[in-house]
Image (cartoon, helix red, strand yellow):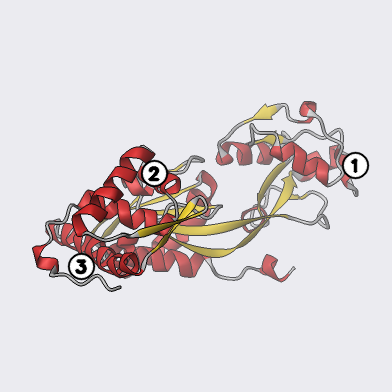
């Protein structure tokens, strides 16, 4: 059954349409309510009201989730187009959609912002001098949906339905310390040789300790006398000879003040993701920055061959 009606005669409530769109994309009312930051009963009433307004059934319940009816699938195409059009109108009204001028906010960890971004931004300044960059540096995750940043460099894939994510590469992280500190440890050869070493802790959850012990180090909380959630502070402590720290191998191997601890040890691996709001498809200046970051940060490194 097709949804046959004169769309010009429908007085569309965008809140109801958005409720339908996110529910369709998330697959359940509970997930959609979390994505929109609203109460599930309120969201359900908006979807019910849209069905009543249109006179069709949009969803069929399957277990704990929903599946679209044929009418719902047809409507979904229209609502998605409406959302994209509304976003473009908003951007054009601000004079930003096609301009290669203006500000782009990039969220990244302190280490990535300080070490990886500068050479990329040099290229950006040469290509598009009209684009201003604002760096949001920190260990927390900026909320792209609230425009705390336009683009974010993250170590996990986002779950929000209105964000676009591109996996750039897997990052090997290794242990580093100063040559002098490694000598004081007796030039360890095996993981268990680090059982008396000091580590600079960057994790309050205990996962770092658990991960190290999973490699056979036999550590306790006493092995972590210094705690910081700031990666630059941690890295400064490591370069100052206070202990061992974990770092992206691309950054660690380029630092002359340190060297790898247990060079043959298998690296810890985490992913690098480039994340942006969907307006990356309609804002040229955001797209330019996004594409440059993807190209530069996604390049293979010598470590990738190991």
Classify 177 as above or below 154: above
Q: Is mark 2 in CB contact (under 8 Å) with mark 1?
A: no
Query: What label does residue 98 carry, if any?
Result: 3
Q: How many marks?
A: 3
Callout in the foreground (2, 1): 2
Can residue 277 be seen here? no
Check disc 3 and report its element: helix, strand or loop: loop
Crowd rating for badge 1 (residues with CA inside 10 Å; few <14, some 14–19, many 20+):
some
Q: Is mark 3 in CB contact (under 8 Å) with mark 1?
A: no
What residue is disc 1 on? 192
Q: Is residue 110 left or right of residue 131?
A: right
Classify 123 as above or below 230: below
Q: Residue at x 78, y 42 (%)?
A: 212
Viewport quadrant of the C terminus: bottom right
What residue is disc 2 on? 33
Of the pair 41 and 153, the residue shown nearer to us = 41
Q: Earlier in the sequence, mark 3 or mark 1?
A: 3
**Residue 220 percent coordinates (x, y):** 81, 30
**Residue 43 percent coordinates (x, y):** 33, 44
- The residues bearing labels 2 and 3 have C-alpha atoms spaced at a distance of 33 Å
- The residues bearing labels 3 and 1 have C-alpha atoms spaced at a distance of 58 Å
Q: Is residue 6 left or right of residue 83?
A: left
Of the pair 132 and 57, the residue shown nearer to us = 57
Q: Earlier in the sequence, mark 2 or mark 3?
A: 2
Q: Is residue 18 left or right of residue 304?
A: left
Check disc 1 and report its element: helix, strand or loop: helix
């Amino acid at each position: 059954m097709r949804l046959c009606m004169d769309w010009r005669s429908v007085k569309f409530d965008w809140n109801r349409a958005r409720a339908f769109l996110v529910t369709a994309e998330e697959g359940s009312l509970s997930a959609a309510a979390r994505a929109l930051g609203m109460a599930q009963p309120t969201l359900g009433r908006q979807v019910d009201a849209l069905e009543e307004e249109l006179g069709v059934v949009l969803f069929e319940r399957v277990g704990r989730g929903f599946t679209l009816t044929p009418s719902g699938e047809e409507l979904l195409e229209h609502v998605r187009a409406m959302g994209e059009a509304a976003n473009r109108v908003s951007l054009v009204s601000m004079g930003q959609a096609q301009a290669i001028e203006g500000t782009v906010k990039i969220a990244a960890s302190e280490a990535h912002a300080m070490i990886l971004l500068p050479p990329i931004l040099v290229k950006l300044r040469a290509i598009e001098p009209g684009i201003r960059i604002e760096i949001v540096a920190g260990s927390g995750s900026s909320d792209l949906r609230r425009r705390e940043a336009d683009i974010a460099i993250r170590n996990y894939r986002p779950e929000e339905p209105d964000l676009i994510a591109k996996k750039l590469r897997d990052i090997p992280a290794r242990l580093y310390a100063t040559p002098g500190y490694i000598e004081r440890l007796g030039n360890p050869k095996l993981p268990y040789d680090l059982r008396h070493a000091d580590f600079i802790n960057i994790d309050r959850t205990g996962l770092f300790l658990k991960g190290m012990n999973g490699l056979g180090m036999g550590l306790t909380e006493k092995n972590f006398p210094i705690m910081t959630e700031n990666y630059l502070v941690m890295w400064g402590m490591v370069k100052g000879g206070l202990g061992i720290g974990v770092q992206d191998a691309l950054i660690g191997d380029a630092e002359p003040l340190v060297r790898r601890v247990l060079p043959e040890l298998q690296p810890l691996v985490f992913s690098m993701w480039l994340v942006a709001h969907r307006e990356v498809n309609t804002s040229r200046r955001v797209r330019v920055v996004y594409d440059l970051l993807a190209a530069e940060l996604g390049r293979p490194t010598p470590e990738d061959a190991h």
